[in-house]
Amino acid sequence: MPITPSVPQRLLARIQLAIPKNPQLQELFRDITTYIEESSAVLQLQPNGQQPASKKRKLDGAEDGAIEDADSISDISFTIPQRKKLKLSLGRTSIRGSNPISNETEFGLAWSKVEHCVCLPVPEKAQPQYNFCFFPREGSDDEQILFTVPGGNVKGAAIHSDVSFDPHESYKDVVIRIINKRLKKKVLEPNEKEFVSKVAQAHRKGEKAVHVKAFRGSKDGFLFFLSNGIVWGFKKPLEFFPFHAITSISYTSVLQRTFNLNIAIQNADDEAKEIEFSMIDQADFAGIDAYVKRHDLQDASMAEQRRAKKINVNGVKKKEDGVEGDGEEDGEGELQKAAREAEEMDDEDEEEDENFDPGSEGESEGSGSSSEEEGDDQRMGQDGRDLVDEELGSEREEVSE
């Protein structure tokens, strides 16, 4: 069986040169070409020459196959639903992750099913990066999408779009403009007027952080406080809590250095649940509490199942002259009170350690002698007589006899 002409000409030429030098490889080459031909025949049996349905994701409301009028950006790092580098295709009806070689769609989401699109800075990175998060409508079976773009400019980037941009413009801004052209909603971003963390950023010193680090169960992540909701990322699944779905926000386990944030939500099916985010730095309590109050989110800290006192970290007290005090006594916040009590306990422990005298143990042990002396005094009468000896004198004589 000869090597079939279906093999590309350049590859066929290399095979023909290799066979005279290694005749034993001729049979191998024949088997390889036969396998390729049979595989191609199987693919041709599929409708429109596409891959089997089990290997290709269908997108309701989105065009199938290649997107002819799509804006595209090559070498984009996706994390959800797949962790790989793909070509980002932004078509007329959907956003897709496409194979950069075959242009086949790996996954996608119809624009009509996108509830929220959020652009967030990636924390704890030496170089700035931004995550674009796409949240499907509630109740949809569609998967979330998350991809990352660098924080530098777009100079040298493989961007194909009719959206005009300057090579020195930031990568993030260009991508946002392209998405806004397709999506009927604006891409959401954090705003320093909404929330800024008080915790210093070790990776990029001097830069303000718009997130707090927290734990949801055993998984660590980050909370972002936006103008219309709260985002949790960046591990699957992402969470977006819009204001209209939040029924209450409360604080628990308020300690000297950390506290827990509890978000109670109610979905479209009127199902209520509460999600706890723990180990949040105490330094960010005031900023989060101000955010909750500014947006009139219900503070459930007064609920009976939570606690009797409302947490008021910025509590103030009016002095007699009408000037605001520092929030002590009646105006003291619960968090401040907990911190103060913890500090007082620490101070007491330190004082006990400083006042500790190793010799005091010996004195304590010697205190038994004073008790014995008191017993001897009670045994002797006021006139110096031994009362016990007098009472038992006759008995002692009989025993001695």
Image: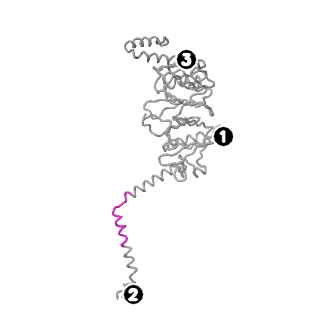
Residue underneath mark 3:
41
- The type of residue carrying mark 1 is Asp
Does 20 sit left or right of 45 as displayed? Answer: left
**Of the two numbered discs 3 and 1 in the rendering, the one whose residue sits closer to the viewer:** 3
Depth order, front residue of 312/222: 222
Q: Position of residue 223 (x, y in %)?
A: 52, 38
Q: Count every numbered label the image shows and give the total.
A: 3
- The type of residue carrying mark 3 is Ala
Dot 2 lies on which element? helix
Q: Assess whether mark 1 and mark 3 are in contact (beta carbons under 8 angstroms).
A: no
Q: Which mark is residue 395?
A: 2
The crowd level at tag 3 (other Cα within 10 Å; few <14, some 14-19, many 20+) is few
| Residue found at x 47% / y 48% | 256
Whole-angstrom CA distance, mark 3 to mark 1, is 52 Å
Depth order, front residue of 243/52: 52
First in sequence: mark 1 or mark 2?
1
Whole-angstrom CA distance, mark 3 to mark 2, is 123 Å
Q: Quadrant of the C terminus?
A: bottom left
Residue extent of the magenta highlight: 353-369
Q: Is residue 397 magenta?
A: no
First in sequence: mark 3 or mark 2?
3
| Residue found at x 48% / y 53% | 341
Residue underneath mark 1:
270
